[in-house]
Image: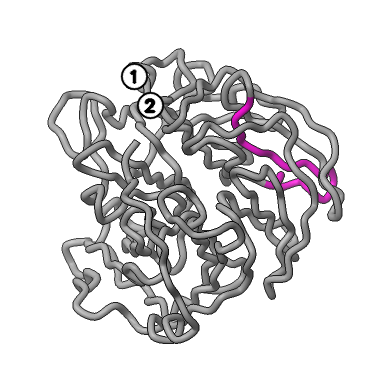
Amino acid sequence: MHGSKPTKTFVRTAAATAATAALVAGLVQTAAANESGTAAVAGQPTAITTISTGYSIPWGMYWMPDNSSALVTERNTFKVFKVTPTGQRTEIGSVPESQTTGGEGGLMGVAVDPNWQSNHFVYFMHTSSDGNRIARMTYDGTRLTGYTALLRGIAKNRYHNGGRLAFGPDGYLYASTGDAQNTALAQDRNSLNGKILRMTTSGAPAPGNPFGNHVYSLGHRNPQGIAFDAQGRLWEAELGENTRDELNLVKAGNNYGWPICEGNCSTAGMTNPKATWTTAEASPSGIAIVDSAVYMASLRGERLWQIPINAGNENVGTPQAHYVGTYGRLRGVTKVPGADALWLSTTNVDGNGGEPAGSDRIFRVTIG
């Protein structure tokens, strides 16, 4: 675990919301496009408004394929909400057999089947009595029903459970798993932990996986953010231990170093991150991509990082921070369909945020 700090209560008002619509003063400017191929200038956050309230540790957010609403999970209550584009929320059920771990486990990621309109399948990653699982339920647009565990055997611990789910452009389900505080698992190709997994909607290893099992990439410590860009590339953010958090460009079969490396290193066979931060200024959770930039929600860092990326190469621009310390711990971020905008969620009700139940919020961030 890292990213914790002494508990404190944040006092935030409508005035703070208005004040932080502007960029945080004194931040490093984003790198501009030039002939050397550095990342292009991305749009800037121009406005932030509260869209939905009343949450306790919202963890996963995933839009329905018809863009009519998003599904939002709560980590410790195991509840799932339908939230409309205007922020109206309705509880649609909970995920059975879920447990907390007294730390970072519980109900985490959610993903909606691209063919939901015909099969009505929704997928969850959650902690259970026997470890972390990836499970499937049926959602008819009103209520969640049924429960099928698709993949078991992902070790759990108080911390380092990973938890993010996303469908790739190839139609397969991707999942991020932590090392469950057992660092050796991250380098074990036969372990499901410390990995990015790639699977079919029945839970089987996806065809073409590099090691013939569920493993897509290895050497991850506690990855909590995955997102695909317009070119179909997979970006991933993970919490480091004591020195460096990472943003990685994930490729099939690559080894991202943990526990041999934290951040950049010269060890043969290891893939270096595209950007790193100190653990105090990041502790990343969710990521999303809008307008040629990765947006990374930060827990301990209490800020939204913007990292410009380039469609033509793998370079990234200079990261820029927004809303530093204004909204507390930031957990989830997802692109709003059909708009240059994000939904951004807080996680201040957890043990490190110190706020009372129901204090967490979802914001809409406009990218100009």
Q: Quadrant of residue 200?
A: top right
Residue 195 magenta-highlighted? no
Instruction: Name the foreground residue: 90 vs 352.
Output: 352
Query: In terms of depth relative to the viewer, which is nearer, 260 or 353?
Result: 353
Q: Is residue 160 above or below residue 59?
A: above
**Residue 253, how many percent across, how many down?**
39, 26
In the foreground, 245 or 316: 245
| Residue 120 percent across, percent down from the top left | 82, 45
Tell me the quarter of the image containing the C terminus.
bottom left
How many labels were placed on the picture?
2
Q: Earlier in the sequence, mark 2 or mark 1?
A: 1
Q: Which mark is residue 150?
A: none
Tell me what residue is drawn at x 33 percent, y 46 percent: 3
- The answer to whether residue 295 of the structure is visible from this angle is no
- Helix, strand or loop at disc 1? helix
Q: Quadrant for residue 106, please give it.
A: top right
Q: What's drawn in magenta, residue-wise?
A: 112-128
The residue pinned by badge 1 equals 187
For the point 47% across and 46% down, the residue is: 226
Look at the picture and state if 66 lies above or below 338: above
Residue type beneath disc 1: Gln
Q: Classify mark 1: residues with Cα within 10 Å, few (<14), some (14-19) or many (20+).
A: many
- On screen, 264 above or below 360? above
| C-alpha separation, residue under disc 2 versus residue under disc 1 | 6 Å
At horizontal 55% and vertical 52% (from top left) the residue drawn is 57
Residue 122 to residue 359: above or below:
above
* The magenta stretch spans residue 124: yes
Q: Position of residue 71 (x, y in %)?
A: 69, 54
Question: What number is the disc on residue 218?
Answer: 2
Where the N terminus falls, by quadrant? top left
